[in-house]
Amino acid sequence: MKKEVWLKNLGAKIRDTRIAKGLTQAQLAHTINKDQQSVQRLEAGNINPSFYYLVEVAKGLGVNIAELVTGL
């Protein structure tokens, strides 16, 4: 799978999880000490997040990191 497709799929999974948890991008960003634009870029698949960033996002969403990357 191409990198761009994987990043778009990851972003969509993060977005869907965030919405299911009833969080806005701004709320998630505040929880993980990022700005809303950073979360927007992540969800759009426009950045390649570090492992640490993914761990922060998973914690902010209250899920295991495996839930974010399984099935991509």
Image (spheres, grey):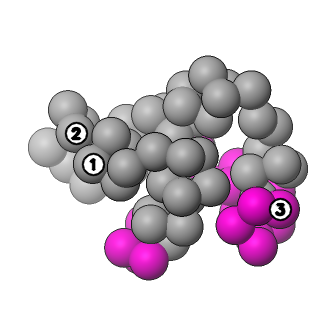
- Which residue is most to the top? 20
Marked residue nearer the N-terminal end (3 or 1):
3
Badges 2 and 1: C-beta atoms under 8 Å apart? yes
Q: Nearer the viewer, residue 27 or 64?
A: 64
Q: Quadrant of the C terminus?
A: top left
Q: Please say whether residue 46 is one of the residues in the magenta stretch.
A: yes
What numbered label is drawn on residue 70? 2
Highlighted range, magenta:
30-52
Per the image, the residue denoted by label 1 is 66
Horizontal side of residue 58 vs 44, given as left or right: left
Q: Residue at x 37, y 43 (%)?
A: 68
* Distance CA(mark 2)–CA(mark 1): 6 Å
Amino acid type at mark 1: Ala
Marked residue nearer the N-terminal end (2 or 3):
3
Per the image, the residue denoted by label 3 is 30
Q: Residue at x 49, y 54 (%)?
A: 58
Q: Position of residue 39 (x, y in %)?
A: 68, 55
